[in-house]
Amino acid sequence: MASRDQILAALRRNAPAAVAAPDVASLGVRFADPAAQFAESVAAVGGACVRVPDLAAADAALTALPQAASATRVASVVPGVGRSTVDLAAIADPHALADLDLAILPGEFGVAENAAVWVDGRVLPHRAVFVITNHLALVIHARDLVHHMHDAYDRLAGRPRGYGLFISGPSKTADIEQVLVVGAPGARTCTVLLIEGPDYRPR
């Protein structure tokens, strides 16, 4: 028997007994008002949450933002919110987005405990858009909030593998002298437009 086979056989003989996975169904805090907790969490991670009743109000709230008022290159992937001056689908090279001022993206759901918003990669014509933009706006519905990350991963379970990500507030780092720097490697601001009426569902 080769040395490799001897080592593998020894490992198999001495492997610990199989142990059932723990039951995590009871883990995670639950909030009496997930929308209020989500808004508080967004502020805690350096973002801003604007609670609005419908899609038209979300568009008006976005338009009122200083970063939207000063933006010239805007890309919206949310019909009815924002007015695109950049057609992402017509851009072949994401380097052409280097001067993108504002991106408006749909969030599929949000997590109340930490302000994470799940963005499905299938809605992004370019994966770079959420990090290359100067300012980011995410649009989600309050009915699509979950309490904690256990709920979030339950919601994602069973899906075909693909690209997606959780976004929690603007880009930030604190690994240099423990000083928090917002907007260093990515979006300088992140605004979540939380729709609490009946008329919005991410596409």
Image (cartoon, rainbow, N blue to C red):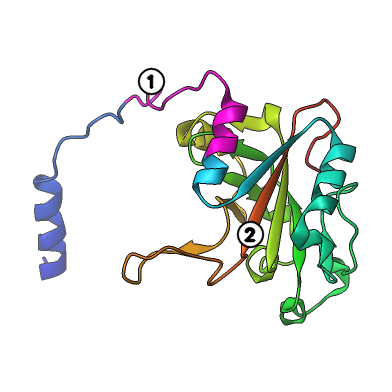
> Which quarter of the image is occupied by the C terminus?
top right
Q: How many marks?
A: 2
Residue 75 in the image: x percent, y percent? 82, 63
In the rendered image, residue 78 lying in the magenta stretch gets the answer: no
Badge 2 marks a residue whose secondary structure is strand
Amino acid type, label 2: Thr
Compared to 73, does 170 lie above or below? above
Task: Specify start and end residues of the magenta stretch as a single range.
Answer: 23-40
Identified at 66% across, 71% down, the residue is 132
Q: Residue at x 83, y 75 (%)?
A: 91
Q: Residue at x 73, y 67 (%)?
A: 126
Mostly what secondary structure, the magenta segment? loop
Mark 2 burial class by Cα count in 10 Å: few <14, some 14-19, many 20+: many
Q: Residue furthest top?
A: 32
Q: Give percent across and percent down for residue 107.
A: 69, 45
Query: Which amino acid is tagged 1?
Result: Ser
Left or right side of 49 for 174? left
Left or right of 95? Residue 169 is: left
Discs 2, 1 touching: Cβ within 8 Å = no
Q: Is residue 157 visible?
A: no
Quadrant for the N terminus, please. bottom left
Residue 22 is drawn in which quadrant? top left
What residue lies at 80% left-to-right and 35% top-to-bottom? 201
Q: Considering only order in the chain, which callout, 1 or 2, is on the residue closer to the N terminus?
A: 1
Q: CA distance from mark 2 to mark 1?
A: 35 Å
Circle 1 Cα neighbour tier, 10 Å, few/some/many (<14 / 14–19 / ≥20): few
In-front residue for pair 81/9: 81
Up-down: is 181 above or below 63? below
Q: Position of residue 145 (x, y in %)?
A: 62, 31
Depth order, front residue of 103/9: 103
* Residue on which the image places disc 2: 189
Q: Which mark is residue 26?
A: 1
